Image (cartoon, rainbow, N blue to C red):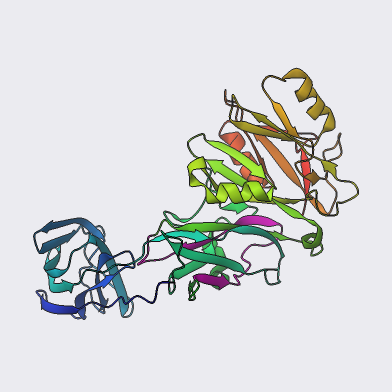
Amino acid sequence: MKCCISLGLAAITLLSATAARAYSESLSFRLSLSGDVLAVAKGKANSCSPVFWQASSITRAGNVITIVSTDQGGGCFIPVEEQSYEVVADLGPLPSGQYEVAWRQVPQSISATLVTATLQMPRVAKIFGGGQQIAHEGYPLPRPFIVRVVDAEGIPVAKAPVVFAPAVGAESGVRRDKFGFRGFNVAADLATWGAKLPQYTLTTDKDGYAISQGPLYDPSPAASLYGAKVQLPFPQNVETFFSVLTLVDWQVQNIGGVVVEYFNESLDHYFMTANESEINLLDSDAKLGWTRSVGSFAAYPLERPREPSSVPVCRFFSAGFTSHFFTADPAECDAVVAKWPDTWTLETRTAFWIQVPEPFTGLCPTTTQPVYRLYNQRGDANHRYVTDRAIRDAMVANGWVSEGVGPDRNVMCAPR
């Protein structure tokens, strides 16, 4: 096991701050565990003053580094009270030596001397974790979120900062689907829940593990993602996701499984599965192109006790469409087998177990919620299954067709 790694610099010397302001200002530097150098301009403002925005360009000529920020906000920061700010620029790997660094944004500039040493540091390569669980509103999660951070050689990385937060994504902050939703039956804006949604940053232990007992952030019944990612100064594209269902019926957690939704951006296709082996494969192999989407719902897997009125769900695959199709209607399952044997291959008649709506009214039992099936109306024939009527309506407005029985047109009934 690799030992602890110092993030300290050999020396940092501030040379000048050309603009006199009513706040303290400095240019400092820190190293990430990848060996890249990060420049950080930070200070406190208590009067109207220019702000150093994110770097728009970074150039290096020999040992002279110039960072230029483009002022995107009018150049005047008027705080109600004293506030701190910080901007970071990634200078990339630097060999050992002394560097003169200037951070410029008209009308001011900050300069400093940076002395670095050549460091051999592990690059974070993977964060293992993810999963799915069923929770009950008002109660703690049944299990904590557990992740493990390792380097390129598979060796655990200690003291890595990991943030756990609702649907946190590396690129966009909050992961949403292509229609702007961050989950099924959730609040449109995370800010709605205020103090219920703190972002918890934990540090991995000597074995690379971080454990979080995250807060429940959506009313039941709801489904959404909880994310864990490695924060700066580590690479930001290392992340994993947990699919969390918040249900009304506390007893459901003892009998239900989770059907997890995935999305393939290059295909523009949705897929869902309750199979743990498939879930582990899709989560671990980025080359397959599937990432966790925002949705999921509860069902009854084969290996657990099932609701007496539940039925098995047929699952088909089309190699020509690179798409799957699910139905809980045995007549529809048989019809697909009979009519399109060369297009749709029946993979299983028991993908999972689910309850079904009354065939004429489309009503679901009171302990369940409707599952809507949407068809994309394209030559690649893809379907999506959602429990959120608002998502269904948004997709219909974007050209998808809602398929199902009764006035509400739903195809399954999932525990709520």
* Residue 198 in view of the camera: no
- The image position of residue 332, as x and y in percent, is 80, 28
**Residue located 21% across and 64% down the image:** 75
At horizontal 85% and vertical 42% (from top left) the residue drawn is 311
**Quadrant occupied by the C terminus:** bottom right
For the record, the magenta segment spans: 208-235
Relative to the observer, which residue lies in front, 236 or 181?
A: 236
Is 228 included in the stretch rendered in magenta? Answer: yes
The x, y position of residue 286, in whole percent, is 49, 46
Relative height, residue 54 to residue 14 (above, below)? above
Residue 66: where, in percent of width, then height?
13, 61
Q: How many marks?
A: 0
**Is residue 388 shown in magenta?**
no
Location of residue 93 by image quarter: bottom left
Name above or below for residue 264 compared with residue 153: above
User: Can residue 349 be seen in this snapshot?
Assistant: yes
Left/right of residue 104 with respect to residue 306 in the rendered view: left
For residue 89, side relative to residue 289 (left or right) = left
Q: Is residue 60 above or below residue 404?
A: below
Name the residue located 37 percent from the left edge and 66 percent from the top edge.
232
The answer to which of 169 and 3 lies nearer the viewer is 3
Q: Is residue 335 above or below residue 356?
A: above
Left/right placement of residue 348 relative to residue 33 reads: right
Q: Which residue: 21% across, 59% down? A: 71
Position of the N terminus, as image quadrant, is bottom left
- On the image, the x and y values in percent for residue 18 come to 9, 74
